[in-house]
Every structure is written in C-alpha cells, then in structure tokens.
Image (tube, rainbow, N blue to C red):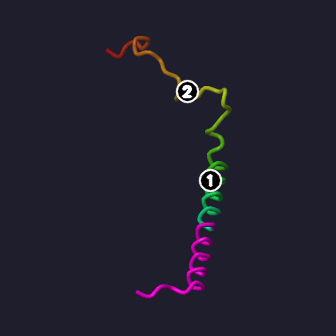
Amino acid sequence: MPTASPGLAARFSDIVTAIGAAFREQREIDARRVLRRYRHLLGQPDEKSCLNEMSPVSARRGYF
C-alpha cells in the first residue's frame, strides 16, 4: 500500500493544526460572549442567590 509523501503529510498536519486553532479561538469568543450576556446572573461570590436558599417543608404552612 503506498504511503503519502512527507511533504503532503506535513501539509495535511498544518491544515489540521490551523483548523484546531480556529476552533479554539471560536470557543474563546463564544465563552466571552456568554459571560458578557449572562454576567448579571453570576453575582458576587459571597452573595446568596434566592434559588440556592432552602426552606424546610415544615416551615411552610397551609399546603396540607
């Protein structure tokens, strides 16, 4: 079975490397865009979100 020439293999490797770099760059761009869009939901690390607060079921009245 014939093998590819070293020059052709190097060219293919360069193309694959360039495509990988383009994908990584696009992921970084998308991540920055998402952070910018949803930054208001992140809040400060010491803040408690009302979604994270739990109230015991026994404290609720009028359900049963």
The amino acid on which the numbered mark 2 sits, given as a three-letter code, is Cys
Q: Is residue 16 above or below residue 11?
A: above
Q: Is residue 28 above or below residue 46?
A: below
| Between marks 2 and 1 in the image, the one whose residue lies nearer the viewer | 1
Q: Badge 1 local density, few (<14 within 10 Å), some, or many (20+)?
A: few
Residue 52 lies, in percent from the top left, at 53, 27
Residue at the spot 62% in from the left edge and 53% down from the top edge: 31
The majority secondary structure of the magenta stretch comes to: helix
Q: Is 5 part of what is drawn in magenta?
A: yes
Q: SS for tag 2? A: loop
Residue 53 lies, in percent from the top left, at 53, 23
Q: State the mark number for residue 50.
A: 2
Q: Which residues are magenta?
A: 1-21
Q: Is 28 part of what is drawn in magenta?
A: no
Direction from residue 57 to residue 31 in the image, left or right: right
Q: Is residue 49 above or below residue 35?
A: above
3D distance between C-alphas at marks 2 and 1: 26 Å
Q: Which residue bears the numbered disc 1?
A: 31
Residue at the spot 55% in from the left edge and 87% down from the top edge: 5
Q: Nearer the viewer, residue 19 or 60?
A: 19
Direction from residue 64 to residue 18 in the image, left or right: right
Residue 40 lies, in percent from the top left, at 65, 40
Q: Nearer the viewer, residue 7 or 63?
A: 7
The amino acid on which the numbered mark 1 sits, given as a three-letter code, is Ala
Q: Badge 2 local density, few (<14 within 10 Å), some, or many (20+)?
A: few
